[in-house]
């Protein structure tokens, strides 16, 4: 990352609530061709999230603690704040002397931008303002949130506007938090009704919707651009009696992860 930071734009896409098992199955069956076409080997990497719900996971990731490979470690990190005794800071790790990654990148000359999706980015409350406040520029509207079926296309419209006014010589760090997979997602499944509620099938349908639109985001980004696409946590649809997240269940803690440089 010491050769990437400063020479590349950086894009972190968090597919909020995406389960690893659903993502892996759909990549293998060819149902998400845009994402699979960019992921190394066409496959998601199986990782463990640093937090079981949006706020906790993003607070960790924005301090440099991305989801950890599920195999035994140690696993050196891409980014790390200066921290004496850190066992996951290696020679390739880009280190920063700040409390959070956006501040560290800002000090390195990046313009930092957040385009939020779920409620922890809505800036309507002090808590909903905490994560966006880490960025020089942040955006959230109801049309970006969980209740709008066109949230991702709406967010990408905003990204296009941001990129259109960014000076050519200014590097960008962009966080895009995608809300489409988060409940409610029943409306992405053809024939489903609100009474049917959210299911694993509607979760998969939401991912198909994301894949159909996310190529436009990647096309907009300037090159060279280093990309991380991952989930912040999974969610349960009745496994062992559980529904939702903020629990210590395998389907919540195991998340898909991919990193690549846009061609």
Image (tube, rainbow, N blue to C red):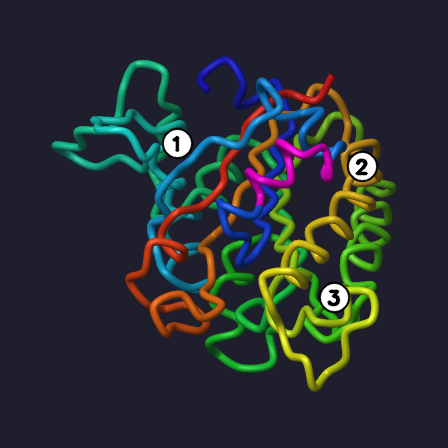
Secondary structure, magenta segment, majority class:
helix
Q: Quadrant of the C terminus?
A: top right
Q: CA distance from mark 2 to mark 1?
A: 26 Å
Q: In this figure, which residue is indicated by the disc labeled 1?
A: 79
Q: Residue at x 86, y 53 (%)?
A: 157
Q: CA distance from mark 1 to mark 3?
A: 28 Å
Q: Earlier in the sequence, mark 1 or mark 3?
A: 1
Q: Nearer the viewer, mark 2 or mark 3?
A: 2
As helix, strand or loop, the secondary structure at mark 3 comes to helix
Residues at discs 1 and 3 in contact (Cβ within 8 Å): no
Q: Residue at x 56, y 48 (%)?
A: 22
Q: Residue at x 28, y 62 (%)?
A: 248
Q: In this figure, which residue is indicated by the disc labeled 2?
A: 215
- Left-right relation of 150 to 196: right
Q: Which mark is residue 144?
A: 3
Residues at discs 2 and 1 in contact (Cβ within 8 Å): no
Which picture quadrant has residue 65? Answer: top left
Q: CA distance from mark 2 to mark 3?
A: 18 Å
- Residue range (magenta): 23-32
Q: Position of residue 89 (x, y in %)?
A: 26, 26
Q: Is residue 15 located in the magenta-colored stretch of the structure?
A: no
From the viewer's side, name the closer residue of 51 and 111. Answer: 51
Q: Position of residue 188 (x, y in %)?
A: 77, 64
Q: Earlier in the sequence, mark 2 or mark 3?
A: 3
Q: Which mark is residue 236?
A: none
As helix, strand or loop, the secondary structure at mark 1 comes to strand
As helix, strand or loop, the secondary structure at mark 2 comes to helix
Q: Is residue 26 located in the magenta-colored stretch of the structure?
A: yes
Q: Is 72 above or below relative to 41?
A: below
From the viewer's side, name the closer residue of 216 and 18. Answer: 18
């Amino acid at each position: 990352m010491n050769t990437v930071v400063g020479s590349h734009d950086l894009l972190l896409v968090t597919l909020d609530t995406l389960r690893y098992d659903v993502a892996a199955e759909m990549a293998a069956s060819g149902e998400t061709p845009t994402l699979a076409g960019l992921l190394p080997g066409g496959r998601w990497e199986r990782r463990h999230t640093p937090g079981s719900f949006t706020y906790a996971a993003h607070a960790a990731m924005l301090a440099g603690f991305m989801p950890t490979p599920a195999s035994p470690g140690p696993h050196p990190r891409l980014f790390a704040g200066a921290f004496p005794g850190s066992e996951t800071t290696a020679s390739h790790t880009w280190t920063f002397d700040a409390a959070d990654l956006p501040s560290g990148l800002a000090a390195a000359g990046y313009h930092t931008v957040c385009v939020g999706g779920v409620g922890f980015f809505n800036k309507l409350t002090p808590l909903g303002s905490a994560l966006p406040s880490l960025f020089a520029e942040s955006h959230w509207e109801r049309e970006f949130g969980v209740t709008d079926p066109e949230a991702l296309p709406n967010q990408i419209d905003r990204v296009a506007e941001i990129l259109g006014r960014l000076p050519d010589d200014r590097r960008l760090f962009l966080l895009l938090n995608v809300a489409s997979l988060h409940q409610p997602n029943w409306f992405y499944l053809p024939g489903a009704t609100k009474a049917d509620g959210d299911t694993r099938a509607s979760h998969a349908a939401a991912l198909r919707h994301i894949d159909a639109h996310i190529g436009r985001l990647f096309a907009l980004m300037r090159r060279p651009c280093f990309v991380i696409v991952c989930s912040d946590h999974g969610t349960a649809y009745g496994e062992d009696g559980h529904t939702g997240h903020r629990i210590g269940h395998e389907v919540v803690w195991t998340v898909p992860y991919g990193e690549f440089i846009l061609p």
